[in-house]
Image (cartoon, coloured by chain):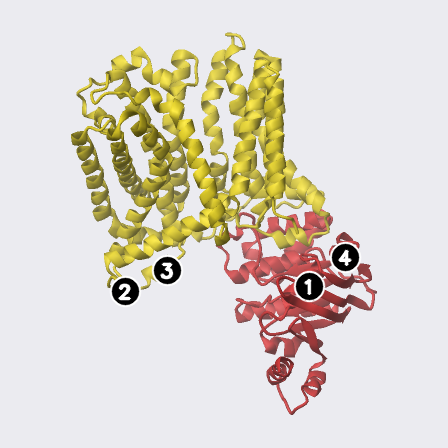
């Protein structure tokens, strides 16, 4: 047992909390589910290995001195991973500032805040690294099985990438705090986290569309023009890629650089962490008076009162808006592709259909959670003299209203190029959104809106059902857009997903 | 604001039963008249909140009947809800709405005419000392201010039955006095108020009748004098009487 107040003691405490948090997330707080969770994870791992095989088998034979194109593609993919990890890390660091939980206790104790926050930064790093390693593991394992044990070095490389991403996230978040202040930092940091995560993916897609009229990122990275413009093979830029192939010198250098960056971030910023957390307490200061603005009294039905309330709450909460509408960022490349397709015929827009349908399903799921489960005054709404059916209908209409607002411009623009694809998209968007809303209705569990980011923890089944449903409807729409009768099979699968979700949903009171 | 001639019995509960993993409310009978302030007391876990939640339609009873102003609340919950208001111990207001917007939303839910609702809203906010904050978002409000906004929301549709679960928790002395005055005014105007509280002094000073619930059953009911008598020994305060009655029930 370590001495209370020491670095090791805090590390043990943080590790225990992180482990219990993870367990609660996996089992939704029901420990008896552990066996089912292990079985599901095992099946998922097996599935991921199968999925990884066709994707990475072409890379397994790469020698210890890969050619320039391979190095460019690998470096691009690593940069993509890094941007996603940095996004995740920034999100976690911001959450650590604002979700006080045990921070009042810690900050009011005589323990050195610097020690506590050093450990906390390290724990967040570890969690980010672990998640990334778990996701990358099937790909690394397949590479190792096909191409030799040297590929296992990629595990260490993923750790190095996570560590450097965390160092960047800590530095950027603290810098935002110091320049923007605590009130603005929360929103800006959350948006930046999402943008950092999305920018690289979207940027590559935009470049691919511009160059090749395709959404494929690898097409662009492998293109002769891009490879020719990239640094020569001896450049330090490729050391992470070389480390992945088992070059131990490159691995040691990358790992050392990452750890040095994180160490510096901890030494420099851990002392400021406490100040930032204390400053973040003040963000609940009263919002400025809403002078000169209508106060909301107008002739309306209970349904319109509910719809207006949902839209007003969404519009007034930029953080929530940024989180729920972030999927729209991913619509930028399809929008660009659509724009390019004007005057070039309708061929390219076939790929747009599933993207739009998928995005609609995901967006509807998030909005439906906010309207249905994230009702902050459930007692008020439940005790109103309005039939429950009507309340649900108003909330569904509120969600569908936003979906229409976001996707109608795309559907109308497509109608000019190809009415058939436009009709298929509209149908797919409605089906995917309706399915996502229905899943949220089946799995509703009262929660605070502020728990939006952690909504998936209440039901893993709902999360997977929502994802599979969106994918299935997107597939159906894609096949329908291509004019094949296989769309009927995909549609049947989408209905099956819903049926299974209904079967597994908890009984409603 | 209230109707001049409400039915004599505002809330009528008979044979109410609710079980979760154990019985929480068992064969509870209760009657509250119009123009009456009824305090429901009981130790933690006695079934007070569960009972009130069944009355306002937030929980379905396993058995029993609930009548609100002559309307069967289980058969026609929407009609029953039209005349009722519920205020819980945890004020549930929307952070991103101002008190005025919150009241407009509540008025919309209850289908109140916008002009009448707006007039009432301003009057209620003035009454509860919230006029200066009427156009500020609730996110920066203290618990007491939020509780007052919730109370204004409960009153903006002019309910004839007000049900409150620990409404004074967390309120400062001045706010608590304002809330009590508002409730008393509603009772004097012919409304019925049912309130749970752990502050026995409030029940002692405000309630026309007091019910004591323990183990899901109503173990004593009546005026303060009635309860002293039911305690069966020489008790002088409600606290002594309450503790004596609960202890005898536990024994």
- Tell us which disc is closer to us: 4 or 1: 1
Q: Chain of mark 2?
A: A
Residue at mark 4 to residue at mark 2: CA–CA distance: 56 Å
| B113 lies above or below A198 | below
Please name the color used to draw chain B: red
Q: Are marks 2 and 1 on the same chain?
A: no
Identified at 37% across, 44% down, the residue is A92
- Front residue of B73/A15: it is A15
Residue occupied by mark 4: B74
Q: Are marks 4 and 3 on the same chain?
A: no
Residue occupied by mark 2: A110
Q: Determine the secondary structure under disc 4.
A: loop
Residue at mark 1 to residue at mark 3: CA–CA distance: 39 Å
Q: Residue furthest top?
A: A344
Residue B18 numbered tag: 1
Residue B210 numbered tag: none
Residue occupied by mark 3: A104
- Tell us which disc is closer to us: 2 or 1: 1
Q: Determine the secondary structure under disc 1.
A: strand
Q: Determine the secondary structure under disc 3.
A: helix
Please name the color used to draw chain A: yellow
């Amino acid at each position: 047992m370590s001495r209370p107040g020491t670095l090791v003691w805090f590390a043990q405490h943080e590790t225990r909390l992180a482990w219990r948090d993870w367990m609660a997330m996996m089992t939704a707080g029901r420990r008896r589910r552990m066996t089912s969770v292990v079985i599901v994870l095992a099946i998922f791992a097996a599935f991921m290995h199968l999925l990884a095989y066709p994707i990475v088998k072409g890379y397994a034979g790469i020698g210890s001195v890969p050619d320039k194109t391979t190095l460019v593609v690998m470096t691009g993919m690593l940069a993509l991973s890094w941007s996603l990890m940095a996004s995740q890390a920034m999100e976690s660091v911001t959450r650590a500032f604002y979700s006080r939980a045990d921070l009042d206790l810690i900050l009011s104790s005589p323990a050195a805040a610097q020690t506590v926050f050093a450990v906390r930064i390290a724990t967040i790093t570890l969690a980010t690294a672990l998640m990334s390693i778990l996701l990358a593991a099937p790909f690394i394992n397949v590479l190792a099985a096909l191409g030799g044990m040297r590929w296992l070095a990629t595990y260490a490389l993923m750790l190095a990438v996570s560590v450097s991403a965390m160092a960047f996230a800590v530095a950027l978040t603290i810098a935002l705090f110091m320049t923007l202040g605590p009130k603005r930092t929360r929103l800006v940091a959350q948006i930046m986290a999402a943008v950092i995560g999305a920018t690289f993916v979207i940027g590559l897609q935009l470049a691919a569309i511009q160059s090749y009229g395709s959404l494929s990122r690898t097409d662009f990275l492998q293109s002769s023009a891009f490879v020719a413009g990239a640094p020569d093979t001896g450049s330090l830029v490729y050391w992470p890629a070389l480390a992945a192939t088992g070059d131990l010198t490159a691995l040691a250098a990358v790992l050392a650089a990452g750890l040095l960056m994180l160490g510096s971030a901890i030494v420099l910023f851990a002392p400021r962490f406490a100040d930032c957390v204390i400053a973040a307490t003040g963000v609940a200061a009263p919002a400025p008076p809403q002078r000169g603005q209508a106060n909301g009294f107008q002739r309306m039905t209970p349904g319109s009162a509910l719809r207006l309330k949902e839209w007003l709450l969404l519009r007034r909460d930029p953080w929530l808006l940024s989180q729920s509408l972030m999927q729209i960022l991913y619509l930028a490349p399809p929008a660009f592709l659509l724009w390019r397709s004007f005057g070039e015929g309708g061929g390219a827009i076939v790929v747009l259909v599933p993207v739009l349908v998928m995005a609609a399903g995901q967006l509807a799921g998030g909005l439906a959670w906010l309207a249905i489960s994230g009702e902050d005054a459930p007692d008020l709404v439940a005790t109103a003299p309005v039939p429950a059916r009507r309340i649900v209908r108003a909330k569904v209409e509120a969600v569908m209203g936003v979906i229409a607002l976001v996707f109608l411009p795309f559907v109308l623009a497509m109608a000019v190029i190809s009415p058939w694809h436009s009709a298929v998209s509209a149908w797919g968007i409605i089906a995917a959104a309706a399915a996502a809303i229905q899943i949220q209705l089946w799995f509703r569990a009262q929660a605070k809106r502020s728990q939006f980011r952690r909504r998936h923890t209440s039901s893993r089944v709902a999360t997977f059902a929502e994802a599979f449903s969106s994918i299935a409807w997107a597939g159906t729409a894609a096949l329908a857009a291509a004019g094949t009768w296989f769309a009927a099979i995909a549609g049947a699968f989408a209905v099956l997903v819903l049926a299974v979700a209904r079967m597994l949903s908890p009984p409603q009171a | 604001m209230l109707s001049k001639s409400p039915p004599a019995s505002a809330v009528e509960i008979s044979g109410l039963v609710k079980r979760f993993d154990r019985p929480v409310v068992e064969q509870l009978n209760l009657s509250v008249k119009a123009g009456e302030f009824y305090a429901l007391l009981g130790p933690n876990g006695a079934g007070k909140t569960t009972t009130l939640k069944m009355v306002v339609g937030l929980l379905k009873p396993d058995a029993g009947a609930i009548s609100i102003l002559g309307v069967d609340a289980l058969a026609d919950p929407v009609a029953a809800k039209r005349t009722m208001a519920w205020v819980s111990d945890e004020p549930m207001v929307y952070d991103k709405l101002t008190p005025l917007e919150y009241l407009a939303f509540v008025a919309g839910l209850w289908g109140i005419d916008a002009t009448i609702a707006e007039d009432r809203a301003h009057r209620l906010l003035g009454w509860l000392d919230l006029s200066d904050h009427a156009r500020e978002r609730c996110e920066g409000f203290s618990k007491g201010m939020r509780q007052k906004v919730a109370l204004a929301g409960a009153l903006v549709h002019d309910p004839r039955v007000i049900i409150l679960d620990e409404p004074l928790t967390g309120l400062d002395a001045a706010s608590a006095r304002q809330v009590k005055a508002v409730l008393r005014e509603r009772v004097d105007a012919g409304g019925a108020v049912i309130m749970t509280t752990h502050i026995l002094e409030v029940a002692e000073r405000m309630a026309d009748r007091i019910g004591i619930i323990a183990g899901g059953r109503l173990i004593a009911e009546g005026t303060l004098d009635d309860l002293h008598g039911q305690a069966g020994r020489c008790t002088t305060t409600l606290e002594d009487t309450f503790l004596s009655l609960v202890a005898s029930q536990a024994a």
